Image (cartoon, rainbow, N blue to C red):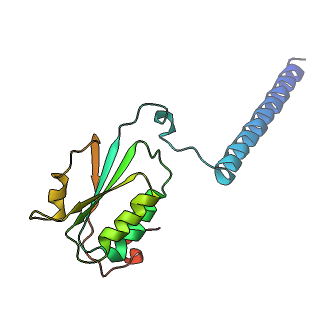
Amino acid sequence: MFLIVVIALLQLYCLLLMAFMAIYTVRHFLFTHNRALHDQRISYEDIIDSDLPFVTVMIPMHNEEAVAGNILELLGSEDFDKMQVEILAINDHSSDRTAAVIQNLAAKYPCITPLHRSSGLGSAQRGFEDRQRIGRYRIRCRLSSPQRDDSQLGFGL
């Protein structure tokens, strides 16, 4: 009689264990399916609801007609809150059509602010001193070779 009770309990334990493993397998299948086939939430999505600081991205350019249009087009078309970002395109004494490219894209994207330096000495880095900065954090982008196209610079990947 004792042996029959032990065998019955072991059978019940095995059935419960198999049911638990089956439920666990289905759960992980659903997680894997969701991860593989659906859009994933960005890891920092929880802070999106908080007050993010205003950011100024400063891009100094000197004779960058060959690359300025594509870079500003990519930055202007990015999916971010345009009220929280200012893209400051600094034209530093360019002798090519860099100023016209910047003006055209500034008209197309309100987050792009042109700054044309036609006087003063020094590099475009000194253009940062010519303007009162609004953003709390700044990102500097340096371009120095108008002979390259965007594929060589690694943009648009």
Q: Residue furthest top?
A: 1
What number of labels is visible?
0
- In the depicted view, which residue is nearer to us: 7 or 38? 38
Q: Residue furthest bottom?
A: 147
- Estimate the x, y position of residue 89 in percent, counting from the top left: 30, 59
| Residue 68 falls in image quadrant | bottom left
4 relative position to 132: left or right: right
Q: Residue furthest left?
A: 121
Say which quadrant the N terminus sits in: top right
| Residue 13 falls in image quadrant | top right
114 shown above or below 19: below
- In the depicted view, which residue is nearer to us: 13 or 130? 130
84 relative position to 130: left or right: right
- In the depicted view, which residue is nearer to us: 66 or 140? 66
Tell me which residue sits at (28%, 43%) in the image.
Answer: 137
53 shown above or below 4: below
- Estimate the x, y position of residue 53 in percent, counting from the top left: 35, 37
Tell me which residue sits at (47%, 40%) in the image.
Answer: 44
20 relative position to 66: left or right: right
150 shown above or below 124: below
Tell me which residue sits at (34%, 70%) in the image.
Answer: 100
Tell me which residue sits at (89%, 22%) in the image.
Answer: 4
- Estimate the x, y position of residue 40 in percent, counting from the top left: 60, 47
107 relative position to 125: left or right: right
